[in-house]
Amino acid sequence: MAKGRELRGRIKSVENTKKITKTMEMVATSKMKRAQDRVAAARPFANALSEVIADLYTAELAEQYPLLRQPAAPKKVAVLLLTTNRGLCGAFNANILKETRALLKRLEGQGLEVEMHVAGRKGIGYFKYLGRPLATQRTDLGDKPTAADAASLVDDLMARFISGQLDGVYVVYAKFNSVLSTPPTTERVLPVTPPARKGPARDYLLSPGPEAILGELLPLAVRNAVYRQLVETVAGEQGARRTAMKAATDNATDLLGNLRRTYNRARQAQITQEIAEIVGGASALAG
């Protein structure tokens, strides 16, 4: 019964695979809930920051702050790419890398020199495969990014933008809309572009003054933007991994059903053949 033994081995292998994918689905679901909570907590603060900056911003004040500098003839920009350290999350990283390739083509098509900064093993491995040099590469960011992680990614880029070494900074990440919608997104974080004011300007009592307050809020807004992009990417990763592992578990269930039916048919055919041989042998002895 070589075929039967082979089928039993395949059934056992698929059962073990199903246990792994089911466990990974449960782990991703747990991590996704915590990541969603971090996204929900980060967005209101980012929105409030944007509103305050929009209310304080004036063309006169903009000339005092390097982070608001709009280069007339940009020459060099930086791209910060956020990917994952692990796979098994479907096309999540592939979509982000596709967005990055399109951004690089667009920027370089404008005659700009582009400097690459990558966080995540998947992005690093991809650009190493292409042979493109990376200015910085990070693999130490885990599933729970912090404000300090965001600052460590963007503070040096801010300093170089202020000094005039860079004319812009773009971030490519996965925007978390829902578990099933995490589109790759490009955002320019430098120079800071104040959002349009919504409604009439608020009447603030400012102390020590708009200049000092805006000077503190602008770097904070850049760091907060990168932090929000980090937590949204992590939430998107866990959502994509949960979806991929659920699909793998469902496929394993279907495959097990097919294998078991095939095994039962093979076993029944063998039993029928053995009975026929026994009956044939008995008839030969009786005759």
Image (cartoon, rainbow, N blue to C red):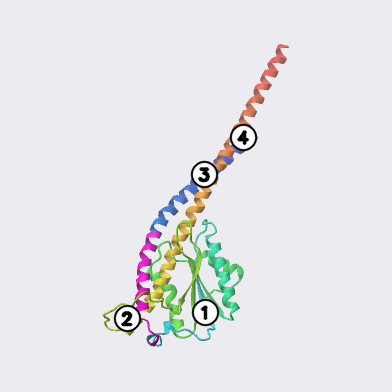
Hey, which residue is sitting farthest top in the picture?
A: 287
Look at mark 1 in the image and give the residue it sits on: 77
Tags 2 and 4 in contact by the CB under 8 Å rule? no
Mark carried by residue 4: 4
**Image-based side of 277 in relation to 48, left or right:** right
Q: Earlier in the sequence, mark 1 or mark 4?
A: 4
Residue 72 lies, in percent from the top left, at: 51, 86
Identify residue type, mark 2. Ile
Q: Earlier in the sequence, mark 2 or mark 1?
A: 1
**Image-based side of 287 in relation to 257, left or right:** right
Look at mark 2 in the image and give the residue it sits on: 213
Q: Residue at x 65, y 24 (%)?
A: 274
> What is the tally of numbered marks visible in this picture?
4
Residue 110 lies, in percent from the top left, at: 58, 80
**Element at badge 2?**
helix
Identify residue type, mark 3. Asn
Q: Residue at x 58, y 41 (%)?
A: 10
Q: Marks 2 and 1, how far apart in space?
A: 27 Å
Identify residue type, mark 1. Val
